[in-house]
Amino acid sequence: MQLGQRAGQTVFKDLLESDTVNIEKLKQYVQKQSIVTEFKPLCWKILLGIKSPYRATRRYVDQANCDIYKRLHSTLTTCQIIQNDTSISQQFLSMYLLDSHAIKIPITSTKEYESFLSTANFICSFLDNDNEQRLDLFLYRYHVGKIAQQEFVYESKLLLHLNTHNIFVSIPENWLKDGFQLIRDDFSLLNIWEKFIAGSEYIFVFLTIHILHYCRGKLLSLYSTKEIIQYLIDLKIDDQAACEHIAIASVASWKKQGNSLLSFPAIP
């Protein structure tokens, strides 16, 4: 295990310290291995396009991003939209809206931006406040149902129950939109998000499968579709051990596919 960890550290160090980071190679390695802890912030920032993969231009890009941040922040502060007590995620939302030329500033209601704020809080806490990928909800739900037929082959009672109530086509939209914030342990969620930012949106299909499997006892005790859907909408998994188990099992199931499932295939 220690040899494997040292080998992983060497690979990440060599990739990230090279003059030009090979993005595709980095993605492929992240899909196969977890990012070494000390390299997580830099790796994430490069994969998300925040930092330049070219060493020669990294300082320039960092300064350009810093200048943009200062300009937006100064404008919003001058207009008194950002106050001393404004949360960092709320500040980023205001800057995002200003940069995208949105009409509704200041924001009187954040309800329509709850997913943005939820994800921003998670990312900010990890990246120290430092690519937008949109997922197709219909394809996501379709492939959850398809993979469930394979993954729940030994859970016939649960599979029948979920199929009977059409749960696979009713997986809560907020699960995907919020980046699965229902998994309350950040470290466990990071292990899932690593695969996503490395190019595999399919990892969320397996995460969904294992969340449903974890909740099988409660799901089997509910007998109306409305009750099941409401339970899933309200679901929060706080237990750290449970979160870790779900994340590990999700990655393991995904790896059984040979890491070949990245983007959602088109429906035949």
Image: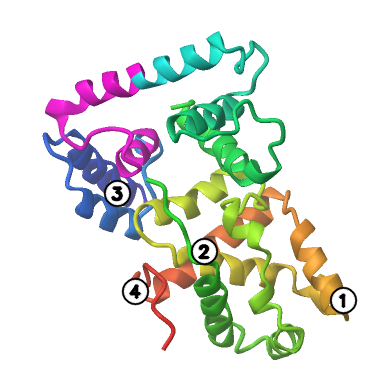
Marks 1/4 in contact by CB < 8 Å: the verdict is no
Give the class, few, some or many, for how many residues have Cα within 10 Å of label 1's Cα (few <14, many ≥20): some
State the predominant SS element of the stretch in magenta: helix
> Does residue 66 show up magenta in the picture?
yes
Q: Position of residue 154 (x, y in %)?
A: 63, 88
Residue at image position (81%, 64%) is 231
Instruction: Please say if 41 is above or below 200.
Output: above
* Amino acid at circle 1: Leu
Q: Cβ–Cβ below 8 Å for labels 2 and 4?
A: no
Residue that badge 2 annotates: 204
Name the disc covering residue 3, or none.
3
Q: Which mark is residue 258?
A: 4
Above or below: residue 118 compared with residue 4: above
Seen as rendered, the residue at the extreme front is: 103
Q: Secondary structure at mark 2?
A: helix
Return the disc, 4 or 3, that comes first in the chain's sequence: 3
Q: Residue at x 74, y 68 (%)?
A: 215
**Which mark is on residue 222?**
1
Q: Is residue 249 shown left or right of residue 32?
A: right
Instruction: Estimate the spatial distance between the alpha carbons at disc 2 and disc 1, rounded to whole Å.
Output: 24 Å
Disc 2 marks a residue whose amino acid type is Phe
- How far apart, in angstroms, are the residues tagged by discs 1 and 4? 35 Å
Quadrant occupied by the C terminus: bottom left
